[in-house]
Amino acid sequence: MLEILDRITRGKGREGDIELLEELALYIRASSLCGLGMTAPNPVLSTLKYFKDEYIAHIKEKRCPAAVCRDLITFSIIEELCKGCGSCKRVCPADAIRGTRKSPHRIDKELCIKCGSCFDACKFKAILKV
């Protein structure tokens, strides 16, 4: 189950993964000999029940609606909101942000490690996390 969940959150989910996850979870719950084993698959079953559309988005659209799966998110700067203060540039550990003072900055997608430091540092809400 962990391997399937990991594959889905990395954007490498396949058709049938949701059904396989559910089948495995139900099998584990039914065949376990202890209470812990019987309840271990419950978080997966619960998320499948209430957030199935998010699983589908991960698998079919290769996107994370909650914007938390590192491999599926991207950061960009909204030029109209960027004041060119440089706070995002100063905190970027990968030196992926380019721009001059008082001019809109840009994020180099090839260098970005998707840590979110720029998003947290921007007081103008100019960093878009999708």
Image: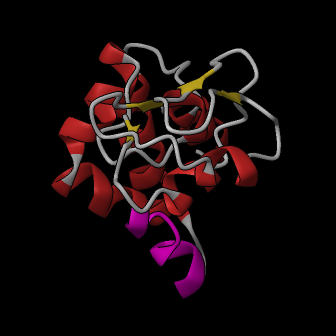
Q: What stretch is highlighted in magenta?
A: 35-43
Outermost residue, bottom side? 35
Residue drawn at point x = 64 percent, y = 39 percent: 114
Of 110 and 96, the residue lying toward us: 96
Colour basis: secondary structure
Q: How many numbered circles does the render carry?
A: 0
Q: Position of residue 73 (x, y in %)?
A: 48, 33
Q: Main secondary structure of the magenta part?
A: helix
Indicate yes or no whether the magenta region holds residue 38.
Answer: yes
Apparent side of residue 4 relative to residue 113 in the rendered image (left or right): left
Asked if one can make out residue 116 in the rendered structure from this viewpoint, the answer is no
Of 2 and 125, the residue lying toward us: 125
Work out whether 1 lies above or below 130. below
Asked if one can make out residue 49 in the rendered structure from this viewpoint, the answer is yes
Q: Quadrant of the N terminus?
A: top right
Q: Position of residue 9 (x, y in %)?
A: 53, 36
Q: Position of residue 41 (x, y in %)?
A: 47, 63
Q: Position of residue 93 (x, y in %)?
A: 82, 46
Residue drawn at point x = 76 percent, y = 22 percent: 111
Apparent side of residue 12 relative to residue 23 in the rendered image (left or right): right
Query: Which corner quadrant of the image does residue 47 belong to?
Result: bottom left
Residue drawn at point x = 46 percent, y = 76 percent: 39
Apparent side of residue 44 relative to residue 88 in the rendered image (left or right): left
Outermost residue, front side? 102
